[in-house]
Each structure stands twice: as C-alpha cells, then as structure tokens.
Amino acid sequence: MKSFTRLQSCLLLLLFCLSVSQGRLRNKVCRLPKETGVCRAYFPMWYFNWSKGGCRVFIYGGCGGNMNKFGTCEKCMRACSGKPWWSIKRICQRLEKQASANLRPRG
C-alpha cells in the first residue's frame, strides 16, 4: 500500500511539472507579436493578442513568422486564452464573424 501511495505522489508531481512547463511555453508563444512572414501568400491565420487578451485574425504570408499562429480561432483560444472550453466556441463565432467582414475585399 505504501508503494502505491508513493507512486501516486510521483505521478501527481510529474503532472504538476508538465502543466507548469506547458504553461511557460504557452506564455512565451502567446506573448509573441504577430508576424506575417517574408512570403506574400494569403493565408488567414489567428494569433493571440496579449495586450487585448484575445485571438485576432491576420494574413500570414506562408513562410517565416513565429509560433504565435493558429489555423483556427478555437485552437488559438484553447492554447492561449485560459477561457473555459465551453465558452470558446461562442467567443470564436463572434470573432470569426468580425474577421470575415474585415477580410472581405473592398472595391
């Protein structure tokens, strides 16, 4: 029984350490500024805007840039926002609607 308790303690410590290290990585990635990259392609992507506390759409050029780019709003919010999973879908629906209006060609 003692070894089982010791095993449980070790597993809990391991999980704690992993979550702390993942949080540090998340903070580093999510604090990076958006970078469109050096190429000129047109890929709508999402980045976490640390000062506004939410994800925003931007146009990624296709190469270069940094790790603060996500294919969907939901991936961005899950990785960086700290919001509960059940609210992310609703938030992203609103943000995606705003983004599609802003990305429409004007002319």
Image (cartoon, rainbow, N blue to C red):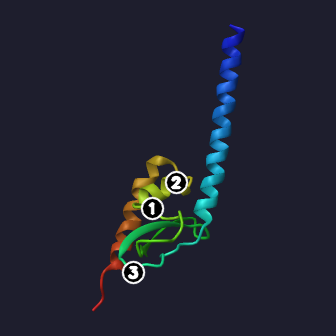
**In this rendering, position of residue 46 left or right of residue 7:** left
Quadrant housing residue 72:
bottom left
Considering only order in the chain, which callout, 2 or 3, is on the residue closer to the N terminus?
Answer: 3
Residue drawn at (69%, 31%) of the image:
13
The first of marks 1 and 2 along the sequence is: 1
Q: Earlier in the sequence, mark 1 or mark 3?
A: 3
User: Count the marks: how many?
Assistant: 3
Query: What residue is drawn where x is 72% and y is 10%?
Result: 2
Q: Position of residue 59 (x, y in %)?
A: 41, 75
* CB atoms of marks 1 and 2 within 8 Å: yes
Q: Quadrant of the N terminus?
A: top right
Looking at the rendering, which quadrant does residue 30 occupy? bottom right
Is disc 2 placed on a helix, strand or loop? helix
Residue identified by numbered label 1: 70
Q: CA distance from mark 1 to mark 3?
A: 18 Å
User: Separation of disc 1 and disc 2 at Cα?
Assistant: 9 Å
Rate crowding at label 2 as few (under 14), some (14 to 19) or many (20 or more) other CA atoms within 10 Å: some
Q: 81 above or below 44?
A: above
User: Mark 3 and mark 1 in contact (Cβ < 8 Å)?
Assistant: no
x and y, in percent, of residue 14 in the image: 66, 32
The type of residue carrying mark 3 is: Arg
Q: Is residue 13 left or right of residue 54?
A: right
Q: Which amino acid lies under the numbered mark 1 shown in the image of this protein?
A: Phe
Q: Residue at x 66, y 52 (%)?
A: 24
The secondary element bearing badge 1 is classed as: loop
The residue carrying mark 2 is 79
Identify the residue at the far left of this view.
Answer: 107
**Percent from the top left, x then y, of residue 29?**
59, 60
Looking at the image, is mark 3 or mark 2 nearer the viewer? 3
Q: Which residue is rendered at x = 60% and y = 67% of the image?
A: 32
Label placed on residue 40: 3
